[in-house]
């Protein structure tokens, strides 16, 4: 009580608790998860099976994408900001073959994790991160929609994987702030 009053944290409104924390909303988040997961799996699978993304010519397609993004840095309101152009030109382009493989397999792994509902919040975070990078590179397409849905999945992480593997895995592993049965010998196993 530094200032003569005690700070009480605000409680989430009932609609937020219901939308992001109620198992009754699991079917809604399942639909979002499957849509976003399928989009990532399709995009990644196409890249993994393309030799200019993963294979003997790895980096060729990504280099073309980066050069296209770099061409969008001109004008009063460029599609690609100079700080991101610097990142693309100095970090991604010289290492395009490595980044190409990381992007392709990252898309596949995010897609699979979302489809089966495994580590849903983490998978959605990495999907949103990739969407942001594509948006920063000036590629709009479905990225805004996938980004918004991913943010919803991140917020609903407790129930977004309820109809999926998270219902089994999360109680076993837990979270960093609350270890599951595997990491906490004091927790009862239900017997």
Image (cartoon, rainbow, N blue to C red):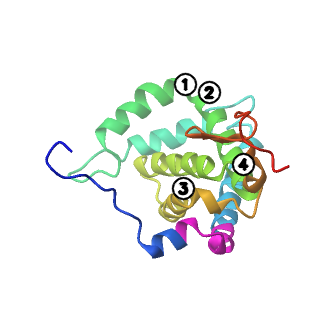
SS at mark 2 in the image: helix
Label 1 vs label 3: CA separation? Answer: 30 Å
Segment colored magenta: 19-31
148 versus 76 height, above or below: below
**Mark 3 or mark 4: whose residue is earlier in sequence:** 3
SS at mark 4 in the image: helix
28 versus 96 height, above or below: below
Label 3 vs label 4: CA separation? Answer: 18 Å
Instruction: Identify residue for label 4.
Output: 171
Q: Is residue 66 in view?
A: yes
61 versus 32 height, above or below: above
Q: Position of residue 74 (x, y in %)?
A: 28, 46
Label 4 vs label 1: CA separation? Answer: 39 Å
Q: Position of residue 128 (x, y in %)?
A: 52, 51
Q: Are marks 1 and 3 in contact (CB under 8 Å)?
A: no
The N terminus - image quarter: top left
- Of residues 169 and 146, the one nearer the viewer is 169
Q: Are marks 4 and 2 in contact (CB under 8 Å)?
A: no
- How many other residues sit within 10 Å of disc 4, few (<14), some (14-19) or many (≥20)? some
SS at mark 3 in the image: helix
Figure disc tally: 4
SS at mark 1 in the image: helix
87 versus 150 height, above or below: above
Instruction: Identify residue for label 2.
Output: 98
Q: Residue 154, labelled with which disc?
A: 3
140 horizontally vs 25: left or right: left
Q: Are marks 1 and 2 in contact (CB under 8 Å)?
A: yes
The verdict on residue 29 being magenta is: yes
Q: Measuring 30% from the left and 56% from the top, which residue is drawn there?
A: 8
């Amino acid at each position: 009580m530094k200032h003569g009053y005690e700070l009480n944290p605000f409680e989430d409104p009932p609609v937020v608790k219901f939308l992001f924390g109620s198992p009754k909303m699991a079917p809604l988040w399942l639909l979002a998860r499957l849509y976003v997961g399928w989009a990532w799996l399709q995009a990644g699978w196409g890249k993994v099976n393309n030799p200019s993304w993963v294979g003997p010519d790895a980096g060729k397609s990504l280099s073309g994408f980066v050069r296209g993004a770099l061409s969008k840095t001109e004008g009063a309101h460029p599609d690609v900001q100079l700080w991101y152009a610097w990142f693309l030109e100095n970090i991604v382009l010289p290492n395009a073959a490595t980044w190409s493989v990381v992007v392709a397999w990252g898309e596949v792994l995010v897609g699979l994790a979302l489809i089966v509902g495994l580590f849903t919040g983490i998978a959605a975070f990495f999907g949103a991160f990739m969407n942001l990078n594509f948006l920063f590179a000036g590629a709009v397409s479905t990225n805004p929609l996938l980004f918004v849905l991913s943010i919803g999945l991140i917020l609903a992480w407790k129930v977004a994987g309820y109809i999926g593997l998270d219902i089994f895995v999360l109680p076993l592993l837990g979270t960093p702030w609350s270890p599951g049965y595997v990491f906490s010998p004091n927790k009862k196993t239900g017997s």
